[in-house]
Image (spheres, rainbow, N blue to C red):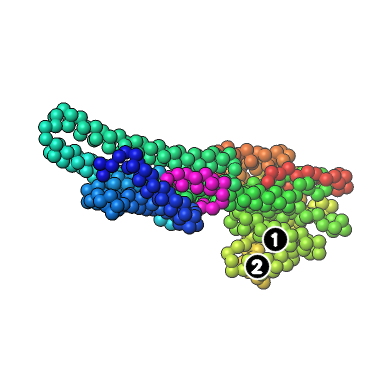
C-alpha cells in the first residue's frame, strides 16, 4: 500500500469514509434520535464507531481484492488506524450529543428523577485511558515494526537517516494521538462546565426563592445523581413552602377567631395574651357576651392536648360549639355537658381532649361562678389581700367521656378591685435554657407583687418575666394568660366597652 500515489490513497480513503458518512446519516434518525435522551449519547458512540471501523475495513478489503495488497500487512494497518480514529471521533461526537441534549433539556421538565443506573466518572476515565493506551501501543508497534523491516531490507542505509526516519514516524504517531487526546479533553471539559453551570445556576435561583427550576439529570454519573438529588430537594422545598403558606393562612384564621375587644363590664379591666409554640396552637380563650336580658358574661379558657394543626382544629370546633350553645342559656356546667357530648363523638378513643375553664360573671350582682373541665384552677386575689385563693373543680376534660356530666363548681360574690387570673400550663411549664421550669410558685409571687397594677400591666409583667427566664430557648407549649380586675358596680359606673390587649 505504501507504493500507491498519495493522491490515489487519499481518494480511496475519501471514498471509504464518504460511504461511511452517508450510512451514518441514513441510520442517525432510526438508531439515535428515536431513542430516549439518556440512551442517545451511547447510541451515538456505537453508530459513529461502527461506521468509521466499517470504512477502514472496507478500505482494507478493497486493497486486498482489487489492488492485491495482503490484508495481514496493509489491511491490518488501515483497520487499526480506523479503529483508533473511530474511538476518538466517536467519543467526541458522543460528548457533543450529550452537550446538545443538556442545553435542550435545561428548560424542559423531563429527567428530573435519579438515573436508574450509575456509571462513575472515575471508571469511565480509567476505561478511556486504558483503551487509548492500548491503541497507541498497537499503532506504535506497527510503525516500529515497519521501520525495522525497512532498515533490514534496505542495505547500505545511512544510520543517521534511518534514525531520523524512525524518530519522525514515532513523532508523527505521538503528535496525532496527542491532538486527539487534547481535543477529547477539551470536549469533555465543555460538558463538565455545562453540567456545573446548570447545577450552580439552579441552586442560585433556589437561594433567591425561585422554586420553579430544576437540573436536567440526564447523565448516569455523579453529576446526574447530584442533579437528581437537587431536584428532590427542590420538590421538598416546594412542598414545604406550600405547607408554610398554608400554615400562615391557618395562623391568620386562628388569630381572627380570638377576641379583639372585650365586652362592657361596668368598668372592669380585662387583658389577655396568647402565644403559640407553632404557627397554630391549641390554646383558646374567649369572652362570650350573652343576650342583654341575661346580664352576664362568660369567660372561656381552654387547652387542647398537644399543639399544632390538629390542636388548632379541635380548638376551633370547641369554640364554635361553645358560642352556639351559650346563646341557648344555662349554667356553665350545663354548657360544658352539652359541648362535651358533641365533641366526644369525634374525639372519643383518639387520645385528643381539651381542658376548659368556663367562668360566668354577672356585673350587676357581682356573682362569679365557674366550672373546670380538667383545667388548672384560676388564681383569685381579693382586693388588698396578700393571699391567693384557687377557683378549681374536679370534672374530666372535654372529649374524654361521652356521657360526662359537668357541674358548676362553686359561686361567690366578688368585690371591686378583686383580681382573677386564668392561665394555661404553658405559662408555668416554660423552661429556661438549663431546663428549669418557670413554676407556679414563681408565677404566684409575680402576681402578688403586681396585684396592685392594671390588668394589662400585670399581663405585661408576666410576659416580661417569662421572656427573661426562657431567654432564647424555644417555647415547647402554647401559653395563654387572661387577667380580670373587678370594677365598681353598674350603678356606680356607666357601661363602657374595654379593650383586650393580646398578641396571638
Residue 465 in the image: above or below residue 15: above
Q: Which of 138 and 362 is in front in this view?
A: 138
Tell me how far mark 1 sits from mark 2, CA to CA.
Answer: 10 Å
Residue 452 visible in the picture: no
Residue 206 in the image: above or below residue 32: above
Asked whether the residues under the numbered discs 1 and 2 touch, taking CB atoms below 8 Å apart as contact, a structural biologist would say yes
Asked which quadrant contains residue 191, the reply is top left
Residue 83 position in % (x across, y down): 31, 48
Mark 1 or 2, nearer chain start = 1
| Residue at 35 percent of width and 45 percent of height | 12
Label 2 element class: helix
Report the residue marked by disc 2: 346
Residue 342 visible in the picture: yes
What label sits on residue 317 in the rendered view?
Answer: 1
Residue 87 position in % (x across, y down): 34, 47
| Residue at 13 percent of width and 29 percent of height | 159
Boundaries of the magenta span: 93-115
What label sits on residue 50 in the rendered view?
Answer: none
Q: Nearer the viewer, residue 500 or 298?
A: 500
Horizontally, residue 115 falls left or right of residue 314, namely left
Q: Residue furthest top?
A: 160
Queried whether the magenta region covers residue 487, the answer comes back as: no
Neighbourhood count class around disc 2 (C-alpha, 10 Å): few under 14, some 14–19, many 20 upward: few
Neighbourhood count class around disc 1 (C-alpha, 10 Å): few under 14, some 14–19, many 20 upward: some
| Residue at 39 percent of width and 47 percent of height | 15
Label 1 element class: helix
Amino acid at each position: 500500500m505504501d507504493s500507491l500515489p498519495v493522491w490515489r490513497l487519499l481518494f480511496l480513503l475519501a471514498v471509504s469514509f464518504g460511504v461511511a458518512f452517508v450510512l451514518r446519516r441514513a441510520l442517525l434518525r432510526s438508531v439515535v434520535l428515536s431513542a430516549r435522551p439518556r440512551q442517545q449519547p451511547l447510541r451515538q458512540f456505537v453508530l459513529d464507531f461502527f461506521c468509521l471501523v466499517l470504512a477502514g475495513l472496507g478500505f482494507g478489503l478493497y486493497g486486498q481484492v482489487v489492488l492485491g495488497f495482503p490484508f495481514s500487512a496493509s489491511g491490518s494497518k488501515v483497520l487499526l488506524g480506523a479503529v483508533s480514529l473511530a474511538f476518538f471521533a466517536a467519543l467526541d461526537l458522543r460528548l457533543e450529543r450529550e452537550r446538545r441534549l443538556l442545553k435542550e433539556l435545561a428548560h424542559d421538565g423531563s429527567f428530573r428523577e435519579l438515573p436508574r443506573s450509575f456509571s462513575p466518572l472515575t471508571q469511565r476515565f480509567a476505561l478511556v485511558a486504558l483503551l487509548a493506551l492500548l491503541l497507541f501501543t498497537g499503532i506504535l508497534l506497527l510503525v516500529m515494526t515497519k521501520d525495522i523491516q525497512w532498515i533490514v531490507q534496505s542495505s547500505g542505509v545511512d544510520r543517521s537517516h534511518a534514525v531520523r526516519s524512525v524518530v519522525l514516524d514515532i513523532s508523527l504517531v505521538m503528535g496525532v494521538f496527542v491532538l486527539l487526546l487534547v481535543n477529547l479533553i477539551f470536549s469533555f471539559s465543555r460538558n463538565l462546565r455545562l453540567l456545573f453551570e446548570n447545577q450552580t445556576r439552579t441552586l442560585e435561583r433556589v437561594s433567591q426563592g425561585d422554586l420553579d427550576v430544576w437540573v436536567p439529570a440526564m447523565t448516569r454519573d455523579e453529576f446526574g445523581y447530584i442533579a437528581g438529588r437537587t431536584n428532590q430537594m427542590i420538590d421538598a422545598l416546594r412542598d414545604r413552602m406550600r405547607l408554610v403558606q398554608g400554615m400562615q393562612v391557618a395562623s391568620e384564621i386562628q388569630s381572627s377567631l380570638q377576641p379583639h375587644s372585650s365586652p362592657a363590664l361596668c368598668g372592669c379591666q380585662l387583658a389577655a395574651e396568647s402565644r403559640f409554640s407553632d404557627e397554630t396552637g391549641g390554646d383558646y380563650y374567649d369572652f362570650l357576651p350573652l343576650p342583654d336580658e341575661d346580664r352576664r358574661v362568660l369567660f372561656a379558657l381552654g387547652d387542647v392536648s398537644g399543639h399544632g394543626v390538629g390542636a388548632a382544629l379541635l380548638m376551633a370546633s370547641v369554640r364554635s360549639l361553645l358560642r352556639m350553645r351559650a346563646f341557648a342559656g344555662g349554667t356553665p356546667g350545663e354548657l360544658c355537658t352539652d359541648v362535651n357530648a358533641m365533641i366526644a363523638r369525634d374525639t372519643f378513643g383518639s387520645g385528643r381532649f381539651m381542658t376548659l375553664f368556663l367562668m360566668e360573671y354577672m356585673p350587676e350582682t357581682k356573682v362569679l361562678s365557674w366550672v373546670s373541665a380538667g383545667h388548672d384552677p384560676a388564681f383569685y386575689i381579693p382586693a388588698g389581700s396578700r393571699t391567693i385563693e384557687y377557683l378549681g373543680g374536679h370534672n374530666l376534660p372535654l372529649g374524654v367521656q361521652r356521657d360526662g356530666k359537668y357541674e358548676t363548681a362553686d359561686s361567690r360574690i366578688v368585690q371591686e378591685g378583686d383580681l382573677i387570673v386564668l392561665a394555661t400550663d404553658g405559662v408555668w411549664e416554660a423552661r429556661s435554657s438549663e431546663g428549669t421550669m418557670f413554676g407556679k410558685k414563681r408565677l404566684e409571687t409575680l402576681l402578688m407583687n403586681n396585684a396592685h397594677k392594671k390588668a394589662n400591666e400585670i399581663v405585661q409583667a408576666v410576659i416580661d418575666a417569662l421572656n427573661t427566664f426562657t431567654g432564647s430557648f424555644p417555647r415547647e407549649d402554647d401559653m395563654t394568660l387572661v387577667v380580670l380586675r373587678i370594677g365598681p358596680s353598674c350603678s356606680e359606673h356607666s357601661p363602657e366597652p374595654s379593650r383586650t390587649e393580646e398578641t396571638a
